[in-house]
Amino acid sequence: MKNLSMMEAIREAMTKKMREDPTVFIMGEDVGAFGGCFGVTAGMFDEFGAERVRDTPISEGVIIGCAVGAAATGTRPIAELMFIDFVTVGADQLVNQAAKMRYMVGGKIKLPMVVRLPLGAGTRAAAQHSQSLEAWLAHIPGLKVVYPSCPNDAYGLMLKAIEDDNPVVFLEHKILYGVRGEVDENAKPIEFGKADIKREGKDLTVAATGRMVHEALKTAEELSKDGIEIEVFDPRTLFPFDKETLFKSIEKTNKLLIVSEENKRGSFAGEISAMVAEECFDNLDAPIKRLCAVNSPVPFSPVLEDYYVPNAEDIVKAVTTMF
């Protein structure tokens, strides 16, 4: 076991696969000698060189488009965009090419590519560099969407993402890059569609993603002092989604609060809510509740940004309304 930050865990997983497989390479803006916008690829250029840690022009359409072509012709590219916000610039290549190409040729090709997307608020980066757009991506058939919340999950899921023969969107919350935890470097890749119960409880299930998992765990510790035991469900992958584990948790607690950093309108939190309402309704003793970010662009003002994003205090307030 090694104690790693989430940034280091992602780097270790990519390095491991690049050492094992010469067809794996990284491409993106400043991923080379500079080490990436957030330092995730630091040191990899020195080991693997410019051919396998490739700096690209400032053109997200080019980055994703090149990854599609490279994947279709036999390599396993990892494409890094600086911010998830800029996936909009490469949307045609991701949505209309990567997500559909293997289907349209009847499975005659593989398309093993990973698109790494830093996301989320909290870095005072304002409206164009702080969004959580996971619902857009999970909506597209042909894309697998991965969203780890801790270093060990990031490590195991990245190994799996690189091995997968289909396009994988790998979401990395910027605030979590520095979060540290134990990582088993000998562990097998984590299968997609396998959620994790981060904390067991009997009174209410909180389904949370990314940074909100940590806020939910803070809430659970606080409420346990008052005798309320929250179960924290982390899906880890949005597609495929592990609804069986979620339903099992709800069968035990009979209540569900969904916490997400997305804008509430059109969020993936709404998809989870609909899924439970359609297939697990009889196990609910109270209406499903969603706690999400405000339906607004992400503010630049620190005070307003802190208000915009749900936190442990907000979760406590939401939980107390459900009893």
Image: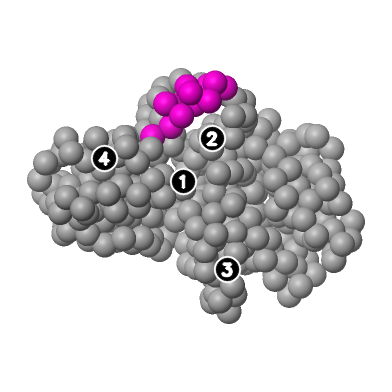
Mark 2 residue element: loop
Q: Is mark 3 on a helix, strand or loop?
A: strand
- What is the distance, in whole Å, between disc 4 and disc 1 at their CAs? 16 Å
Quickly name the residue at label 1.
211
Labelled pair 2, 1 in contact (Cβ < 8 Å): yes
Q: Is residue 260 something that shows in the picture?
A: yes
Residue, disc 3: 3
Label 3 CA crowd tier, 10 Å (few <14, some 14–19, many 20+): some
Q: In which quarter of the image is residue 26?
A: bottom right
Type of amino acid at the residue the image marks with label 3: Asn
As drawn, the label of residue 122 is 2
C-alpha span from label 2 to label 3: 24 Å
Q: Which residue is drawn at 23% across and 49% down?
A: 223
- Whether residue 73 is visible to the viewer of this picture, yes or no, is no
Number of the front mark, 4 or 1: 4
Counting from the top left corner in percent of width and height, residue 62 is at 78, 38
Quadrant in the picture for the N terminus: bottom right
* Mark positioned earlier in the residue sequence (4 or 2): 2
